[in-house]
Image: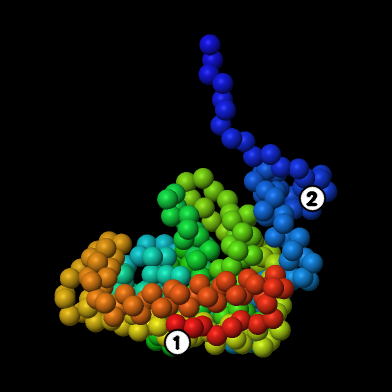
Amino acid sequence: MPTLDTSPRLLVKVASGEIRRHNRWNPGFFDTRFQKVERQLRRLGARPLGDFIPDILPDGSKGITYGQVGSRVLNPRGAVRYLQVINLRDTGIDFAIKPDRVAEGSQNDPPRSRVRKGDILFTNNAFRGTDTLLGRCVVVPSDYGKLNISQHIDRIRVAGINPFYVCCFLKSRFGSLQIQRVTHGVDSTGISFECIRAILIPVLPERVQKEVERQYLAMSHCHEQAMAIKERLLKKSGIEPGQYGEAINSLANENAVYRQTFAEAEERLTHLNDHLEAVIEGLEKTIPPFTD
């Protein structure tokens, strides 16, 4: 007798007009949780993120671009730091985990994807088993000097909206559910420029956006203190960081000050994201200060 397939199925109810409007035939796209977030954001008058990403900025740079494509030639003495997806943590950039460099002006250092203070870095791709990396984003809080990125990171510059608020919104459930909704792929998952531009974002009062920036920078300060400890440990020990940073992570986690400082960065980010969601939902008027 054939075995009855009792595996769970996704059942969604959707009008034909919705299918035509989105031009999507994947039932998962119309999951109730995705539709609920879209309705919430539309009631708030949310606008597409693309409204704030110019094609070209006044300085001639692109509003959104990806990093270097093609063969990667690393140069330990290169003048340009080179970021890959693994270098992006929720709280900021980790240069110690994979301290790669490339030669300035080489094919691995295209001018269009050079990174500067205030840029949003957004992970545009993930492979099987690393789905949580897709959509991970940070704002570059400091001038790190010459810095470039791999093709799996998008560099975004916005106008008319605070980049720190945009980044935190993308981290919130309102942003992350929209990212989950539009991802595609089988062995790898990616998100296009078009889908990023289509993400709905409510324009909160400027005072709220500035408070997000203030608290994000305070969080970044803790993150950078922890990363400075980590980089000193890497330099002093002379160890290889490991393919995925296993060795340097293990060494850093033995350091009590590193653990405490990094934990505070994570706690500050959680506080910021939780209260930002409450503000968007109308449950709070502003984001309260972080209490250690």
* x then y, percent, for residue 221: 42, 85
Say which quarter of the image contains residue 49. Answer: bottom right
Which residue is depicted at the point 81% across and 45% down?
15
Position of 114 with respect to 282 (left or right) is left
Which residue is depicted at the point 67% across and 55% down?
34
Position of 10 with respect to 90 (left or right) is right
Q: Amino acid at mark 2?
A: Glu
Q: Nearer the viewer, residue 165 or 53?
A: 165
Which residue is depicted at the point 42% across and 50% down?
129
* x then y, percent, for residue 109: 41, 75
* x then y, percent, for residue 173: 60, 64
Count up the numbered dots. Answer: 2
* x then y, percent, for residue 207: 67, 88
Say which quarter of the image contains residue 45. Answer: bottom right
Q: Residue at the top extreme?
A: 1
Within-10-Å neighbours for mark 1: few <14, some 14–19, many 20+: some
Q: Secondary structure at mark 1?
A: loop
Compared to residue 274, the image places residue 31 above or below, namely above
Residue carrying label 2: 18
Q: Amino acid at mark 1?
A: Ser
Within-10-Å neighbours for mark 2: few <14, some 14–19, many 20+: few
Does the rendering let one see residue 57?
no
Q: Secondary structure at mark 2?
A: helix
Q: Nearer the viewer, residue 57 or 12?
A: 12
Give the number of the disc on residue 142. 1
